[in-house]
Every structure is written in C-alpha cells, then in structure tokens.
Amino acid sequence: MRRFKAFIYNFLTSGTGDTLDYISRNRLMFANAVIGCGVPMLWFFAYNALHHGNAIIGLSTLITGLLLFVAVIVTRWLKTFTFLSFFIAIVVFLLFFYLGYSGATEGSGIFWVMTYPLVGLFLLGARKGSILVILMGICTGYVLFTPLLNLMDFSTQYSLRVMGSYIILWVFSISYQLSMETSQKVLHKTLIHLADEKEQTDSIMNHVEQGIFLIENDFTLGNSHSLSLNKLLEVENLQGSSFLEILKAQLNAQDFQAAKDYLEMFHRDDINPDLLREINPLDEVHFNAEDVNNKKILHFSFGRVNREAGDFGILGIVSDITEEFLLQQQLKTEEANYSRNMRHLFQIIHIAPDLLEDFLGQTSEDMQKINQLLKAGKAETKDLLNLIFQLLHGIKGNALLLGLESLGKDIHKIEDSIKQLQKSRAQWDDLLDLTLNLGDLQKTLGEIEDLVKRIKQFSGGQGSLNRETNSNPQNSTEAAEVTQNKENQGSSMGISTTSSLISAWKNLLLRESQSQQKKAQLVYEQLDLTIFSPKEKSVIQEISAQMIRNSLAHGIEDSQIRQNLGKEENGTIELSSRMNNNRKIFQYRDDGAGLDAEKIRQQARSLNPPVEKLETLTQGELIHLIFRRGFSTNSQGDISSGRGMGMAVIRDKVRQAGGKLRLSSKKGQYTCFIVEF
C-alpha cells in the first residue's frame, strides 16, 4: 500500500517530489490527475467520433490526447510545471476553440468554450491565464457574430447570452482564483511557520537548557531533575539539597525571607494559582552579583503538582535570562540613542551647512578648552566653574540660535548642575558628576557630527544639507513678523554665510516669539557683517542670540500692553553696523520696555556679595549691574533666561575679542547695546 501511494504521488508530481513551491506543486498534481483521467476519455471520444464517421473531430481529439500524453513525459524529463501548464493551456485552447467553431455534436462545442476560463486560470494563474481567456473570448465572439463563420447559425440573442455567460464565468473564475492564490500563500506561510515552530520545539525538548526540578514538602530537591540545573545553580550534587539554602546563599536577607514566604504559600489549598504567578519574587534573581565575570540572572517559575494519596510537590523551572536581560538593556539604550539621533536629525536638516560647520568647529574648540581646564587643575574651583559655564553658555546660545533645541536643553541641565556646585562651594573632588555630564555632552556632539557626515555622504559628498526654509510667520497669530530686507553683499564672509546667519536670527526670533506669546520683527537693512573678522562675527553671532532671547523674555511687551502704551503692536529688534574712524561698530536695539533702574536697585539688594553704595548709585550705574554675575530680573529661570549669567557672558565675550560694550536704555522706550571693535 505504501509503495502504491508513493507511485501515485510520484506520478502526480512528475517526479519532482517536494522541490516545487506549494502552489505550483498543487497545480501540477491537479494537471496530472486531469490528464491521467482525461487522456483515456479523449481517446474514447476520438474512437466514438471516428466510428460515427466524424473524422475531423475524431482526429483532433486523438491528437490532443497524444499531445497531452507527450506533455506528461516531457514534464517528467524537465521537472518543471511551467512547460506543462503553458502546453496544456494552449492545446486545450486550440481544441476548445475548434469545437466551438465547428459546433461539435449538435452545437455542444460552445459549452467546451464556456469552461475555458476555469482551465486557463487554474493552469496559468489569474494574470497570465486571463490573457488566453480574453483571447478565447475575442475569437469566439468574432466567430459567433460573423455570419460566414457562424457554422451553427446561432442567433444574435443566443450569441449575446453565450458571451455574457462567458464573461460572468471568467469574472467569477478570476475572483475565485485570486482568492485561492491568496489563501494558498497564507496557508503555505502558515505551514512553514508551524513547521519551523515544531522544529524549534523538538530541538528545545531534545536539548533542554532550562533547569526542571521538583521541590518536596520539606523544600528539599527531588531525585530527578534536568542536567542543566546543576550548571544553572552551580551545585554539583543537588539530590536531597535544600532549595532554600541554595537561595539563601544568593539573596539578601529581605529577598530570601520573601522567597521563603512565597514558597510556603504553595502548601495552602486556598491560594489562587494565578495570584501565585503574579507575585513571584524569584522572577528575576541575580546570581553571583558580586562576581563581575560570573554573574547571571535567573528566572524561576513554580507550580503546584498534585500526586497520589493527597500528596503534592512544587514543580520548578529555572532558566538563564542573562542575555535577554542584557539585550533588553541594550535595546533600551539603542532606542534612546535612536530617538535622540532622530531629534537631532530633524533639527540639523533645516540648518544652513555653513552655520552648522562653523558651530561644530567652534564647539569642538570650546570643548577642548573645557577638557584642558579640567586636566590642568590649576584654577580655583570657583574660577574654573565660571570659565566652564561661560564656554557652555556660548555653546548653548549657538545651539538655540540654530534650532538645536535638544542639545540646548542638555547643556541647560549641565548649567543647572554648575549653579548648584557654585552655591555649595564645591571643591575639585566634587566635580566627578560634572565631568561625567560633560562626557555625555561630548558623546552627543559626536553623534551630531556623525549625522552630518552621513548626510553629506548621502547627498553625494557635496556637503550640502537642506537650506534653511523660513516658516511663514503669518501661519500663527503669535508668530514673529519678520521684516524682509535686502541682503548686504560682501566679499570677506560670503553671501551664503551672511544670509544663513540672518535666517538663523529670524528663526530664533520666531521660536522665541511663539514661546513668549509675543510679536516681534527683525530689521537689518543697515547691517553689513562683511566688515567684521571671523572672530568678531562669531562674537556678534553669539551675543545677538542671547540678546534676542533677553529681548523677548524681558524687554518687548505683550501686544495688548504695547497698544495701550501707544506703541506698534509688533516689537522691533534692529541690527545695524557702521565704521567710525577705523573702529567697527555693531548695534543691537529693541523698542521694548527698557531697563527699570529702581527695579534693578531692588533686585540688586539680594546679591551676594552685596553691591557697595547701592542706594547712591546713579541710573547709568544701576543699569550696568545687569552685567554682574548672578543678577536677573526673572524670579524663575528657563532655557531662555533667568540665570543671571547671560549678560556677564556677553560682556566677557566682547572683552576677550578685544572689543568694548556700551549700554543705553530708556524706561518704556528702548534698550540698546553697542559693541565696538
């Protein structure tokens, strides 16, 4: 019987066995089954036709049977279903068309034509088969509606019904075939998946790595357990050992007591098994926690096993989940890194390439200076923290200017930690956390540089990122209204750098305006950055970003307040430059509330150390107190302002560049900063 089944399977698959894909193998088996039954029937029909004198029908049927028989032999030789499917489809096409054309016996040939959609679509599939099915329909329709070719003299109404039925049968067949192909693919994938699952299950059961054991009523281990248990628990002879003693050697007192109480709960008959699974304290046990090279994480699960005579035991399964645990930790880290990189990517693709490269270059220099300060260890801690804060504050300002909000927030947190160190009068030994935070910042900057390199490689090495595109300020009623002015042309900086920097200022103004829910416009028609050296331009870039944030946070009023004061609804920030007797002048001016000298005097009373002769200072002397470290008129600081360090950093930056900084202000009208190089 087995040999007979093997013979039938070999015949139906043409000797291909299981080498063909699932769908092709099914079609091949069906085709061979039809041919195996159909060829003898065709020869019988041929004999019957010849016997009754219908030589043409008889010979055509005989030849068709012979061709199909030869096709089976050729298919076994080629071991491919493609040849057989096309050959049968074409042979049957010719036979059915001839039967339909000639009418066969009493016009029955047309019914053979009607079945062709079933044959063609099954053999060739829905798409390829439809080509022959449509061709058969066209040929049959031409014969039916051409009087000279319509040998059976079918009426027009009859012919229309025949063609309509043919089309309906084709539509039904193609719908069914598509559905069947989809189902077969799904079934095939499911079978493969089930086979893989079965193979994996068999492999696990044959080479089980889990420790399987039984705990007796006195918490000793039973006589039988899996061989992996010795390796997992690192005990050579487990037979008769106390499971509680093994746990006690690995757990602290509190965790051991929780595990002991948990196992004792299995002795009670009124405990819900689901509850026991949920409260398992041994779900994640750290073995050899103090041995760095040999520590591992084990997962225990337990279940009560009832035995004869009312006795019971506790079935335990333990598995090493160290790799899984570490993988989860790694996955969390990678997800955090991916999320951070995506935030950086979405931000840097909108930054002009020249500004971004300048930022990365300047930031690299500043980070090297910070590292050198920490390595030297010569400066007083207070001075060291001030210098580091100043460098970081500059990096943060440039980051926020370019729209690198995530990086700005990271630096803002480090600034917070520096402020705490300054308040606590920290010594060198207290700077460990700061160095770790700076290391994380360096890593983040490295990730940004790596993203920039990837973007350059992706863009063909041209070094071109997406150019800055300004969002339309009119899209929000709270957006900044940016005045469009002509760009100043120059040779030393390059037009793209000037344009990029101005675009960055515009976007910073837009973001800060939306954040503060104010309206402001940027005017720069009198600004020519080409007169400044690269170092001077870098200072202007940095201090302007700080000033814009300060203007929106402290100076420019809300639209309603400005209207009540008779001002324009939109605040104005004006940037300009000029030459004066070989001196280069940069001016920043806003038409906000100006500086309130008395408010400054009141705020200065809380400064430590106190300001000498505070009560006798003039208005001009009072407004210059804003450059003192720790001074701020904001009671609560945020990423934009409120630390009392920004203006001090501006003053120091200008001095380091060899410049002078002057300040003028009138309460309720304006604040103006003039930088002279």
Image: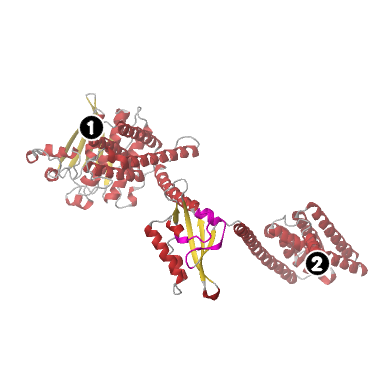
Residue carrying label 1: 675
The amino acid sitting under disc 2 is: Met
Residue 504 at x, y percent in the picture:
34, 40
- Residue sticking out furthest to the top: 582
Q: Which quadrant of the figure contains the N terminus?
A: bottom right
Q: Where is residue 484, by image quadrant?
A: top left
The amino acid sitting under disc 1 is: Val
For the question of whether residue 482 can be seen, the reply is no
Q: Is residue 235 magenta?
A: yes
What residue is rendered at 49% in x and 37% in y? 457
Tag 1 secondary structure: strand
Residue carrying label 2: 1
For the question of whether residue 511 can be seen, the reply is yes
Badge 1: how crowded within 10 Å, few (<14), some, or many (20+)?
many
In the rendered structure, the answer to whether residue 76 lies left or right of residue 319 reads right
Tag 2 secondary structure: loop
Q: Which residues are magenta?
A: 217-244
- Is 375 above or below relative to 61? above
Residue 210 at x, y percent in the picture:
54, 57
Of residues 255 and 664, which is closer to you in this image?
255
What residue is rendered at 80% in x and 60% in y? 11
Q: Where is residue 119, by image quadrant?
A: bottom right
Numbered label attached to residue 532: none
In the rendered structure, the answer to whether residue 540 lies left or right of residue 184 reads left
2 and 1 marks in contact (CB < 8 Å): no
Residue 576 at x, y percent in the picture:
25, 34
